[in-house]
Structure formats: structure tokens, C-alpha cells
Amino acid sequence: MKVSCEALRQVEAICRKFGNEPGELISILHECQNTLGYLPEEVQKVIARELGIPASKVYGVVTFYSFFSMVPKGKYPVSVCLGTACYVRGSDKVLEEFKRVLGIEVGETTPDGKFSLDCLRCVGACGLAPVATIGEKVYGRLNPSDIKKIVAEFDA
């Protein structure tokens, strides 16, 4: 998918907002992802050029931190916690059910663009394990049998 010229101008403006300072790379990446929804290679190259740093450095940061994505996320990003407390309480089965219900694998987005599926290591709600988030909403004490109903809430 090609990034529009307008989007690339927005990226340049975000870099300028942070004074084109290489030390602001993570802040710039956050704002660019919040604006565009993801950080494709084209955007990373513009950021590298604007900050005067190698594109490989930008790529390294994007791929190191799980928050950043190089592919568009769905309108409703689903994240299943696989941290210790959640895993011990069955989050692997919850993840399998999300994959089955949505018809996608981890790191993918549904063809209609509604849902994307990812894993994370801790939501900070261990007392509610197993936990998943959809957007900003946290779902706790999940069972695989809950997933179809939860997805239906967003699929209306």
C-alpha cells in the first residue's frame, strides 16, 4: 500500500515539531503511528531523512518495540496477554479462539479492516487473568466461550 503525499507531509511536519532531533525518535514514531495508524518503510525513510540518521536505526527501533507496527492495524486492535499469570490461566486457548473466530493469525488484520490480532506480555491486570484488550477496553477472566460474543459487540 502506497503512502499518500499528504501523509508524508504530515510525517515531515511531526519531525519539525520535534526539532528534527534524533533524540526525539521514539516520540516522533509514536506521533506518526497515532496519526497514520502504522509505520511503513516509506514513512521510516522520511523520518530518517528528516532526522539525519540511517533508516536502519529507525527500522531497528520500530521492530524492537512491540507497540510499533509496520502494517495497518484494524479498526479494533485485539491484543491477548500471554504474560505468566494470563498464560497459566489459559490465555493460549483464548488466543486460539480469537484466531478461529476472526479467521486470522497473530500479526494479521481481517480483510474488512475491522480487527487485527496481536499478543502482548502484560496488561497490568494480572488479577483478572486471562486478559485481552480491544482498543482501550480490557476484558478479564476470559474463557474461549466468551470470544464470539465479545467480537460480535464490535462487529455490529
Image: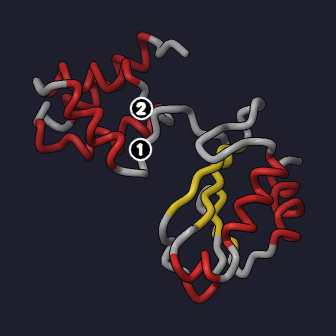
Q: Residues within 10 Å of mark 1 (few under 14, many from 20)?
A: some
The residue pinned by badge 2 equals 39
The residue drawn where x is 69% and y is 72% is 139
Q: Amino acid at mark 1?
A: Phe
Secondary structure of residue under mark 2: loop
The residue pinned by badge 1 equals 68
Q: How far across and down, in percent of the image, does residue 13 sit? A: 27, 25
The residue drawn where x is 74% and y is 67% is 93
The residue drawn where x is 66% and y is 58% is 134
Quarter occupied by residue 119: bottom right
Contact, CB < 8 Å: mark 1 with mark 2? yes
C-alpha separation, residue under disc 1 versus residue under disc 2: 7 Å
Specify which label sits upstream in the sequence, 1 or 2.
2
Q: Nearer the viewer, residue 4 or 124?
A: 124
Q: Is residue 2 above or below residue 116?
A: above
Q: How far across and down, in percent of the image, does residue 7 sit? A: 43, 20
